[in-house]
Image (tube, rainbow, N blue to C red):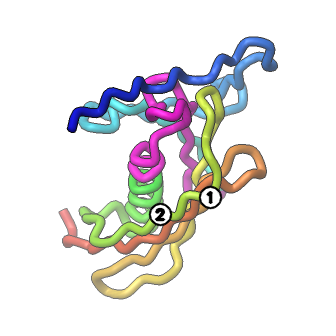
Amino acid sequence: MPNTEQPASPPAVAGQAAAFDPAAAGWEPYRDEGFIGLVGPFWTRQSGDSYRYAFTAEPKHHNRRGVVQGGMLMTFADRSMGMTCWYANERQPQATVQLDVHFIDAVQVGEFVEAKCTVVRRTRSLVFMSAELVVGDRVVATAKGVWKTLGKR
């Protein structure tokens, strides 16, 4: 049976305060020519001995209800935790072997989503990660994952 329901339009942002400018707040664009290039740009900035990651929810990220698609949040969590893991693991090649995401609150188009990633535990071949995806102080998703170290380059 074909789906004839029309997708929702992203919510109008008229009347809201001026859009957040990541560059003015010290964030730098994180670009990638692969899949992330299609859904990005993501943003990054140094935080202690690691990096933080973020993205601004754009109209291209919305789902049929007009809020950010869960798959976008999963992609963002995977890349953010993966990059945090990569830096913490001496930039060794790695692969995601498990990713669990819990959606807590909807993200609206125009909102700036940050990933707060943590290395939970390391073994010789695995790195266990966790993250909170936040908009300001509002947690919108949590994630846990495991990365397999593939060996030195």
SS at badge 2: strand
Q: Is residue 133 above or below residue 120?
A: above
Q: Amino acid at mark 1?
A: Ile
Looking at the image, the residue that sits furthest to the front is 1
Which quadrant of the figure contains the N terminus?
Answer: top left
Marking on residue 104:
1
Q: In the rendering, at what x and y percent does residue 71 appear? A: 39, 47
Residue drawn 38% across the image and 61% down it: 86
Choose between 103 and 92: the one closer to the eye. Answer: 103
Mark 2 neighbour class, 10 Å CA radius: few under 14, some 14 to 19, many 20 or more: some
Choose between 139 and 6: the one closer to the eye. Answer: 6
Number of dots carrying numbers: 2
Would you say residue 71 sits in the magenta stretch? Answer: yes
- Horizontal side of 97 relative to 14 (left or right) equals left
Which stretch appears magenta?
A: 48-76
* Residue, disc 2: 101
Looking at the image, the residue that sits furthest to the top is 14
Residue drawn 52% across the image and 38% down it: 68
Looking at the image, the residue that sits furthest to the bottom is 123
Q: Amino acid at mark 2?
A: Val
Residue drawn 53% across the image and 30% down it: 66
Q: In the rendering, at what x and y percent does residue 126 appear? A: 33, 80
Q: In the rendering, at what x and y percent does residue 110 appear? A: 63, 26
Q: Is residue 9 above or below residue 97?
A: above
Would you say residue 108 sits in the magenta stretch? Answer: no
Marking on residue 76:
none
